[in-house]
Amino acid sequence: MPDAKKIVVIGAGVAGLTSALQLSKNGYDVTVVAKFMPGDYDIEYTSPWAGANWMSFVKDNERLANYDRITYGVFQKLIKECPDAGIWPQRCITYVRPEDLNKKSDLLGGLLDARPWFADLVENFTMLDSSTVPKGYSQGIAYDSVCINVQVYLPWLQSQCLANGVKLKAVTLKHIKEAVNLHWSGHKAELVVNCTGLFASRLGGVMDSKMYPGRGQTVLVRNHAPAMYNVSGTADGEDELTYIMSRPGGGTILGGCYQKGNWNGAVDPNLAERIIKRSLELCPELEKEFPLDIVRHNVGLRPSREGGPRVELEELDGVGKVVHNYGAGGAGYQSSYGMADHVVELVELAFKER
């Protein structure tokens, strides 16, 4: 691609790899540089610790809804065309407790609406009333969604990038300006895409003070659940959650929590016990075939940002044009293709402005 515009993407999580893939499909010559790559496990590398699924909690924000809308369509296509991607269809069910009716939730947002924004997007959307939800709940919703095995999907995404000519480099950066000289060709990058997640708070030249961790903790078990479940709240505190996701290829994720500003990567055993207790109360079918069989405990730090994700074009001294794509919080997978498509639009705009 001698005449293709040269771009360096910083970050090899779901945001960075998806951005790189979409850019490469649009004819750009892309190099991904990152400290961590698929297959690595580190508390600083968020994407391998995700659930993950599509369960949009957007409320009154068309930009964010469009990110999720685009991604839902791509995931549905991947289910049919790429069985090796680690994505499979699952029924998603949300139950709402009486005390959470009409309650504003910063975590669950529009997911608690009787008819959320995506009701006409997803397949087989159903509103559940008091006669069709378990005892202790007032209402709910059910719809066809997807669950993602991130241990399969991330390497698959990396392989798609490589197949499209993207080059990868394992590099640790201290300042964003270093990326300009890291294109595989040896020539300077004509544009940098910043997909550094939480590291955007510490990367020289960016230092985004709006970034903060949303600590999550889950339990991976070998047992199977008949659907994905989510509950509007718990009796164990505002920052604790209850959700269940059975992954393609086996194993089920039990969650969880969203602890704002907590950087602790260690497993909290008491929280793990509460997660297990709530999960079994919600879905006794987990132990239908055999007692709960724990594989491991997980802790991840969601790359959250005050005011929402940053997807924008900026001019930086010593770097030139930069497109930022970070801060999706817990929506990293379910918004990934929509955000990456926005990146492509901004890149095209940047080159038109020159």
Image (spheres, rainbow, N blue to C red):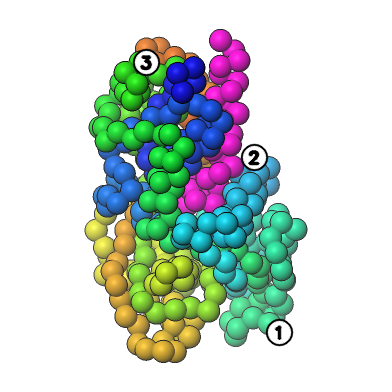
Can residue 14 be seen? no
**Residue nearer the viewer, 341 or 293:** 341
Closer to the chain start, of discs 3 and 1, is: 1
Please identify the residue farthest to the right as the structure is shown. 120
Closer to the chain start, of discs 2 and 3, is: 2
Which of the 4 image quadrants contains residue 67?
top right
Dominant SS of magenta comes to: helix
**Dot 1 lies on which element?**
loop
Q: In the rendered image, which quarter contains the C terminus? A: top right
Please identify the residue farthest to the top as the structure is shown. 354
The kind of residue tagged 1 is Ser
Residue 188 disc label: 3
Disc 1 vs disc 2: Cβ atoms closer than 8 Å? no
Closer to the chain start, of discs 1 and 2, is: 2
Residue at (50, 33) in percent of width and height: 24
Q: Dot 2, crowdedness within 10 Å: few (<14), some or many (≥20)?
A: few
Query: Which mark is nearer the camera, 2 or 3?
Result: 3
Span of residues in magenta: 327-354
Residue at (32, 29) in percent of width and height: 203
Residue 131 disc label: 1
Residue at image mark 2: 63
